[in-house]
Amino acid sequence: MKPKELSQDECSTLLSSVRFGRLGLSMNNLPYVVPMSYVYHGNVIYLHSRGRGKKVEYATENSNVCFQIDLLEKDHWSSVAVFGTVKLSDSVEAKQKMFDAFTEKGQGGHGGRKFQREELEKMDMTIWEINIKEMTGREGVW
């Protein structure tokens, strides 16, 4: 059976139901793909990582990213690819926004607890907000 294109609503539903995906970055014509947990909330994909490292270096140099997820079931597969730009921040407000999005989606993260401002200030964490410019998806059977 030929794969079927997913509608924007179907892509959003799939993005909302999966917890892990692959972040694609590029710098100086060198690709870099890493698996990451995420939350999709308000047409934005939120991720977090340590405050430094290869991912941050790539994204700082080139904010154009892609993010891909898939769902593999017994005899069925579906996949969504997102293209957009990423904004990196280590502000307390960005950290709170990301944790709130994880909590609202019931994904918890860090035990699902609420953090005080002082705790957020001490976290060595970079918040990634992927602003979606294009989203495509497909599904099919094995």
Image: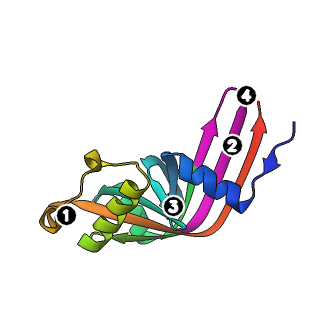
- Circle 4 Cα neighbour tier, 10 Å, few/some/many (<14 / 14–19 / ≥20): few
Residue 50 rendering spot, x and y as whole percentages: 28, 56
- Circle 2 Cα neighbour tier, 10 Å, few/some/many (<14 / 14–19 / ≥20): many
- Circle 3 Cα neighbour tier, 10 Å, few/some/many (<14 / 14–19 / ≥20): some
Give how far apart the Cα atoms at labels 2 and 1 are.
Answer: 36 Å
Q: Amino acid at mark 2?
A: Ser
Residue 1 rendering spot, x and y as whole percentages: 87, 36
Q: Which residue is mark 2?
A: 78
Q: Is the stretch drawn in magenta largely helix, strand or loop?
A: strand
Residues at circles 4 and 1 in contact by the CB criterion of under 8 Å? no
Mark 4 or mark 3: which comes first in sequence? 3
SS at mark 3 in the image: strand
Q: Which residue is mark 4?
A: 75
- Circle 1 Cα neighbour tier, 10 Å, few/some/many (<14 / 14–19 / ≥20): some
Residue 102 rendering spot, x and y as whole percentages: 39, 55
The answer to whether one can see residue 91 in this image is no
